[in-house]
Amino acid sequence: MRTRWLQNLYQYDLRMLLWFMHTRHRHLWISLARAFSRSGDGFIQVLLPSLLWLLDRRNGQALFAATALAFAIERPLYWILKNSCQRRRPPEAIPSFRSVVVASDRFSFPSGHTGAAFLLATITTEHYGALALPLYLWSSAVGLSRVVLGVHFPTDILAGALLGSGLACFANSLFLSQLAL
């Protein structure tokens, strides 16, 4: 039963990946994907909390501290999951498949770019609700970009989004309870 479920999930992942790779206007998608993927490399995850701390001492400081705590947990957990699951990236898993970019590490599950982007979006939204829509649109675009570039399967993106969002909720719960005191 479990093997059948995993096989069905893999087939879904494969169909979605190939659809993205062969869709019309592929060159436009690739250009956008490169830009969004680069924006998820980590500088926004440092820049935005730092900027908000400078502009709004009280909430910004709590946001910065919660973000630092969440990333201190997320990065090692992401690395452990990635190296424990050892899911091969699409170019290694699919014969004759070529990605648009070369990934910086070997395994694909979960997506670190997506996890970090959703962590930032979720943690920031709790402190600054007005930023929710642009941050979640950006996070989704970062995740989608990784599929379009051929370095992740769609479920890698889903797992990264869940990991980042979950850890953000955990870190926020710690720091928001401190603000209420």
Image (tube, rainbow, N blue to C red):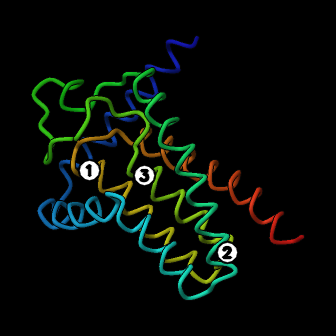
User: Which residue shows up at 53% across the image and 44% down it?
Assistant: 74
Looking at the image, residue 171 lies above or below residue 91 = below
Looking at the image, residue 163 lies above or below residue 172 = above
Q: Which residue is mark 1?
A: 20
The one nearer the camera, 18 or 147, is 147
Mark 1 burial class by Cα count in 10 Å: few <14, some 14-19, many 20+: some
Quarter of the image containing the C terminus? Answer: bottom right
Q: Which residue is mark 2?
A: 127
Q: Which residue is mark 3?
A: 114
Q: Residue 21 at x, y = what percent?
A: 20, 48
The total of numbered circles placed on residues is: 3
User: Which residue shows up at 47% across the image and 49% down it?
Assistant: 115
Q: Secondary structure at mark 1?
A: helix
Quarter of the image containing the N terminus? Answer: top right
The one nearer the camera, 86 or 58, is 58
Q: Residue 16 at x, y = what percent?
A: 34, 43
The one nearer the camera, 115 or 133, is 115
Say if mark 3 contacts mark 2, CB within 8 Å.
no
- Left or right: 47 in relation to 38: right
